Image (cartoon, grey):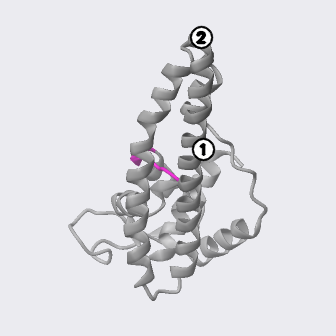
């Protein structure tokens, strides 16, 4: 499914949580799904208008959305709920990996094993920092009693396990490259 179509469902999903403005959607996404799905304001606002035009969301009358005046707040419609449920029941495609670090490793012979090991070593603090963020989110979610909590926890666990795996891969790769580098210098 094309990204723009999936964007529609990401926004419908956000609206299924509560009525939101485009700004609210972006802020909420940055605090939740941005670890695995990112939307820009340039994507959100046109999609909100299209969802409203398609009857999947509707703009609340001014003043009902809370906050400041002239803020356009949208809510999901019953048709939007049904479209979201239908999409959730569809088979998902296998994730396509687009990884700059893997691309660099693939062509790493051009800089040599020692230099590539250093590039990988420099990546470790980023992964460790993300794992600390995830640990904080996990503690917060463990105290959450909303009906969404088990689903959010499952999503988070994928991120945690994926990053732990990535960290193990980095350490294993560095060790392998150090062996190659030792052979390159002899």
Q: What x and y, as percent, mark residue 154?
A: 59, 72
* Label 1 packing within 10 angstroms: few (<14), some (14-19), many (20+): few
Instruction: Pick whichever, 118 or 3, lies toward us.
Output: 118
Label 2 – label 1 distance at C-alpha = 26 Å
Of helix, strand and loop, which mostly describes the magenta segment? loop
What is the number of the mark on residue 106?
none
Vertical placement of residue 139 versus 180, above or below: below
At 39% across and 76% down in the image, what residue appears?
Answer: 139
The span picked out in magenta is: 37-42
* In the image, farthest residue toward the right: 91
Instruction: Pick whichever, 23 or 136, lies toward us.
Output: 136
- Tell whether position 15 is magenta: no
Viewer can see residue 76: no
Q: Quadrant of the C terminus?
A: top right
* In the image, farthest residue toward the bottom: 145
User: What SS does tag 2 mark?
Assistant: loop
Pointer 1 residue: 169
Q: What x and y, as percent, mark residue 39?
A: 47, 50
Q: How many marks?
A: 2
Viewer can see residue 129: yes
Given this view, does label 2 or label 1 mark the residue nearer the observer? 2
Q: What x and y, as percent, mark residue 70?
A: 25, 62
Pointer 2 residue: 186
At 67% across and 75% down in the image, what residue appears?
Answer: 82
**Which image quadrant for residue 26?**
bottom left
Query: Quick check: 69 left or right of 85?
Result: left
**Which image quadrant for residue 87?**
bottom right
User: What SS does tag 1 mark?
Assistant: helix
* In the image, farthest residue toward the front: 186
* Label 2 packing within 10 angstroms: few (<14), some (14-19), many (20+): few
Instruction: Pick whichever, 125 or 4, lies toward us.
Output: 125
């Amino acid at each position: 499914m094309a990204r723009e179509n999936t964007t529609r469902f990401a926004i419908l999903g956000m609206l299924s949580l509560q009525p939101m403005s485009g700004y609210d959607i972006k802020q909420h996404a940055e605090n939740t799904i941005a670890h695995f799905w990112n939307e820009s304001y340039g994507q959100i606002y046109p999609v909100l208008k299209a969802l409203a035009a398609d009857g999947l969301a509707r703009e609340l009358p001014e003043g009902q959305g809370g906050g400041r005046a002239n803020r356009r707040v949208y809510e999901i419609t019953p048709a939007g709920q049904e479209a979201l449920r239908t999409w959730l029941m569809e088979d998902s495609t296998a994730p396509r990996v687009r990884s700059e670090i893997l691309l660099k490793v693939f062509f790493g012979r051009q800089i040599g094993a020692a230099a590539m090991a250093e590039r990988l070593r420099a990546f470790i603090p980023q992964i460790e920092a993300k794992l600390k963020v995830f640990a904080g989110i996990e503690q917060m979610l463990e105290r959450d009693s909303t009906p969404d909590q088990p689903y959010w926890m499952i999503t988070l666990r994928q991120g945690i396990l994926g990053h732990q795996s990535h960290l193990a891969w980095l350490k294993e790769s560095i060790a392998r490259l150090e062996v190659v580098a030792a052979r390159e210098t002899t």
